[in-house]
């Protein structure tokens, strides 16, 4: 029986890889500061500018205030008397996906500040004020807040990326590293035994990758080749309202049902 599924385009794949690789890198750290954790789980890259551990003379509950001070310090007054963020500070205002966030006030910074306000409240309630903490503990704490609807993110893609690495993420936005598992996830068809209606196409793409001297298990290599094969087969439906060039590609597939 035929069914329709929407596969990610090249832009979506690139985004997934950047987010997952960034999450893996920072999850390898032994500890985070609360600001570092808030930035990461809001989709922001914590450069060394953000990650210093303050001295013990600070007030016990200060992380949101410190975040505001650091953010405001990135702005400088120009010769015309107007304040702006100079190009030299751009590296401190980049997303976990590599996006520059200088041009506008990004909701990611609002999310980060929201996280820190909740963290400060937690510290006050428990009378415990750690300067550094275990990354997993911080991620799980924040997910519990979301689960209890105590906090709402503008975009929780970033939290889901870290949860997935912790083994409890369910977001379809973040793809697993395994090629076939990735296709299972984005199409919701196939079975747990490894069968998938695109298995033949995946295998063909992997052989093509090998013939070109490329990695046959790399998502960024195999996905575009599969899309090219599907395009040649004529199963990509560009007339579908869900089609978005580079981001969403509707295809007609045989899901294996009789």
Image (spheres, rainbow, N blue to C red):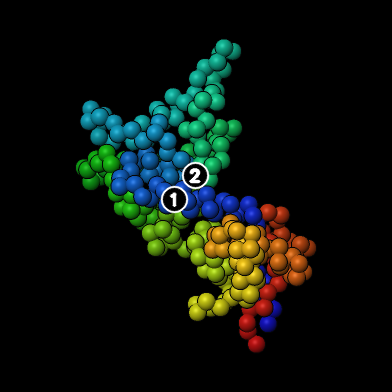
* Quadrant of res 99: top right
Q: Quadrant of residue 37?
A: top left
N-terminal label among 2 and 1 = 1
User: Where, quadrant-wise, is the N terminus in this rendering?
Assistant: bottom right
Q: Is residue 113 above or below residue 154?
A: above
Label 2, secondary structure: give it: loop
10 Å crowding of disc 2: few (<14), some (14-19), many (20+): many
Q: Position of residue 175 (x, y in %)?
A: 52, 60
Left or right of 83? Residue 135 is left
Q: Position of residue 98 (x, y in %)?
A: 54, 42
Q: Is residue 163 left or right of residue 239?
A: left
Tell me whether the residue at label 2 lies in contact with that at label 1, contact meaning CB atoms closer than 8 angstroms.
yes
Q: Secondary structure at mark 1?
A: helix
Is residue 111 visible from the viewing direction of this image?
no
Q: Is residue 8 left or right of residue 119?
A: right
Residue at 71% in and 72% down: 252
Which residue sits at x=63%, y=63%? 211
In the rendered image, which residue does mark 2 sit on?
96
Question: Could you tell me how far apart the alpha carbons at marks 2 and 1 are, in whole angstroms?
Answer: 8 Å
Q: Nearer the viewer, residue 83 or 7?
A: 7
Question: Closer to the camera, 44 or 223?
Answer: 223
Q: Which residue is mark 1?
A: 23
* Numbered circles on residues, count: 2
Q: Where does residue 243 sit, x and y in percent of width and height?
A: 71, 59
- Evaluate whether residue 193 shows in this view: yes
Q: Please, which residue is most extreme toward the top here? A: 79
């Amino acid at each position: 029986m035929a069914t329709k599924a929407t596969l990610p385009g090249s832009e979506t794949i690139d985004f997934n890889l950047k987010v997952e690789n960034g999450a893996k890198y920072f999850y390898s750290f032994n500890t985070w500061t609360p600001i570092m954790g808030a930035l990461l789980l809001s989709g922001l890259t914590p450069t060394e500018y953000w990650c210093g551990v303050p001295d013990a003379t600070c007030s016990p509950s200060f992380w949101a205030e410190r975040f505001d001070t650091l953010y405001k310090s990135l702005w400088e007054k120009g010769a015309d008397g107007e304040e702006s963020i100079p190009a030299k500070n751009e590296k401190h205002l980049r997303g976990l996906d590599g996006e520059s966030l200088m041009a506008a006030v990004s909701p990611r910074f609002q999310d980060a500040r929201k996280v820190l306000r909740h963290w400060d409240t937690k510290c006050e309630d428990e009378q415990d004020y750690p300067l550094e903490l275990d990354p997993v503990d911080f991620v799980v704490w924040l997910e519990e807040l979301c689960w209890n609807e105590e906090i709402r993110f503008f975009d929780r893609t970033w939290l889901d990326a870290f949860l997935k690495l912790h083994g409890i993420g369910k977001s379809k936005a973040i793809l697993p590293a395994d090629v076939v598992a990735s296709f299972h996830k984005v199409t919701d068809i196939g079975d747990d035994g490894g069968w998938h209606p695109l298995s033949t196409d995946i295998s063909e793409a992997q052989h093509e990758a090998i013939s070109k001297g490329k990695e046959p298990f790399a998502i960024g290599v195999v996905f575009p080749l599969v899309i090219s094969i599907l395009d040649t087969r004529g199963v990509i439906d560009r007339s579908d309202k869900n089609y978005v060039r580079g981001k969403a590609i509707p295809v007609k597939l045989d899901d294996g049902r009789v």
